[in-house]
Amino acid sequence: MNTNTIQIADRTITASEIIPLLSDYQLLSKLRRELIIDRAIESVTITASEAASSSEKFYQQRGLKLAGDRLTWLLQHGLTSQQVKSLTVRQLKIEKFKQLTWGDKLQHYFIRRKQQLDRVVFSIIKTEKLDLAQELYFRLQANEESFADLAQKYSQGSESIVGGFVGPIELGNLPPALVQVLITSQPKKICPMSQGEWQMIIRLEKNIPAKFDDSMRQRLLNELFELWLSKKLA
């Protein structure tokens, strides 16, 4: 077989066709990404015990406890046990690289990001009619009707289906003007606000502060890794 060609089904692909095909199928940036990662993790060391453990974890996560089940799975996916070992070792090296590079910076990064990571639950009524918004605000202040009932009747947003209820949602996923209202408000306080053509009535229901736990640490490690990669790819 010619080492400068690849046979896929009934098509023979030459070496000179590879790069154009990767570009056509939008895989060239993926290749660049993986090559940058490979260069970064070259110096990361993994013990034989760690390598064996990572492979075992890979199989266990897929419910493959018996050797026969593992062999069947490998055949179905066109993989060998050595390829699985290489994949899991690479992933382990990536995780070690993240920890070695940003592990001691996570708490500072968390503090800087905390306001965006904090979550809120709130209720909202949204309308394009200023006079209606004013009327609903006064009716809420007078406790004439519940917020949920008024939201279902009058709000023009999709949240009207659930009585204006939104969340839990991270503050970083909300418009800055709305964030400002929410972080300066007290639970159950009715707050009117305008944004563009919309007139809104907001009621903060609950604050849920972000926690610097294991799940958050992993998320922030992944964020910093992706930010680093995006700069390398730019």
Image (cartoon, rainbow, N blue to C red):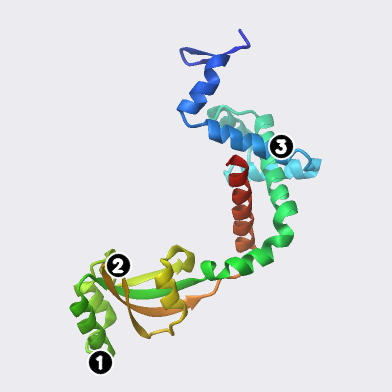
Between marks 2 and 1, how big is the CA–CA gap? 27 Å
- Which residue position is annotated with label 1? 142
Q: Position of residue 142 (x, y in %)?
A: 25, 92
Q: Amino acid at mark 1?
A: Ala
Mark 2 vs mark 1: in front = 2
Crowd around label 2: few <14 · some 14–19 · many ≥20 (10 Å):
few
Between marks 3 and 1, how big is the CA–CA gap? 65 Å
Q: Position of residue 130 (x, y in %)?
A: 21, 76
- Residue in front for this viewpoint, 233 or 78: 233
Q: Amino acid at mark 3?
A: Arg
Q: Is residue 54 left or right of residue 112?
A: right
- Which residue position is annotated with label 3? 39
Q: Which quarter of the image is occupied by the C terminus?
A: top right
- Which residue position is annotated with label 2? 196
Mark 1: which secondary structure? loop
Query: Can residue 139 be seen here?
Result: yes
Crowd around label 1: few <14 · some 14–19 · many ≥20 (10 Å):
few
